Image (tube, rainbow, N blue to C red):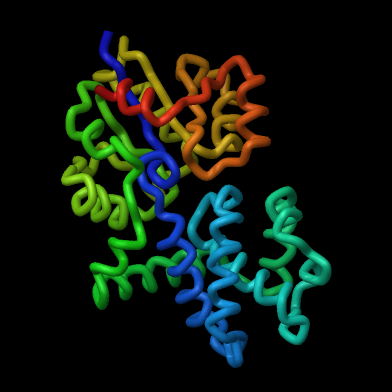
Amino acid sequence: MEDLYALDFDGVICDSCEETALSAVKAAKVRWPSLFDGVDSALEDWIVDQMHTLRPVIETGYETLLLVRLLLEMRLPSLRKSSVAEGLTVEEILENWLKIKPVIMEEWSENREALIELSGKVRDEWMDTDFTTWIGANRLYPGVSDALKLASSRIYIVTSNQSRFVETLLRELAGVTIPPDRLYGLGAGPKVNVLKQLQKKPEHQGLRLHFVEDRLATLKNVIKEPELDGWNLYLVDWGYNTQKERAEAASMPRIQLLQLSNFCTKLK
């Protein structure tokens, strides 16, 4: 029986954490330039470091801009416009981001679509003006490039990243060109809906279905859908998740914890 793998991109195939953090700071400077008056390189470096720690809470790129501004407000009381920044810690953001995000979105009068557009525009400009540095801020996880090239399974990419960035990174870092109909990026809808689409395709009937993710919350959403009971679910142990999430996943019968070496073997 043939296998179909639906793969998340960031945190499964590509470690884009550095690029995500640097792009977020660049975009935040465009969106709120006055907030960065007097912000020195040491504080910027601190923000980038904290963004690495906070990567597990990010589902879509626009959230990175919100985190950058929130970190600024945590460090610089004079900039505070939100009710949550005072006394807030990075650990508390990790635990409560889904509650914090709508509060700051409202208090800062921000719009999701506008932030998504800005985030993409800033990344495009970085690619256009300094492609080498942009590519260098991303890396594929060890062994993934060869596994994708040699894969005997049907591979689909299901990601909240913007498709044009995923296509570029796969081409430049892995030497892989993925057909457009195998890539579901930002705008394709919730991942549970994409999985439903994939399993309904006539050419996929009779295939073993596998979904590989680094976000436990996404896998939980799949489990809530009885229609998706036929999918084998995997949480990777090398992506953007925490030890607490991995321990929780290990206690859930539907989810298998996956090591990088086993992942690369499975695709072949």
202 relative to 81 in the view: left or right: left
Q: Residue at x 55, y 77 (%)?
A: 44
Image quadrant assignment for residue 142: top left
Q: Which x, y percent locates residue 199? A: 37, 22
Task: List the single residue furthest toward the top.
Answer: 1
245 relative to 9 in the view: left or right: right
Q: Is residue 255 visible?
A: yes
Q: Which x, y percent locates residue 43? A: 60, 78
Q: Which x, y percent locates residue 143? A: 29, 35
Q: Is residue 15 above or below residue 104?
A: above
Q: Is residue 169 above or below residue 81?
A: above
Q: Quadrant of the C terminus?
A: top left
Q: Residue at x 53, y 82 (%)?
A: 41
Image quadrant assignment for residue 106: bottom right
Q: Is residue 114 visible?
A: no
Q: Residue at x 40, y 49 (%)?
A: 15
Q: Residue at x 38, y 43 (%)?
A: 9
28 relative to 157 in the view: left or right: right
Q: Quadrant of the N terminus?
A: top left
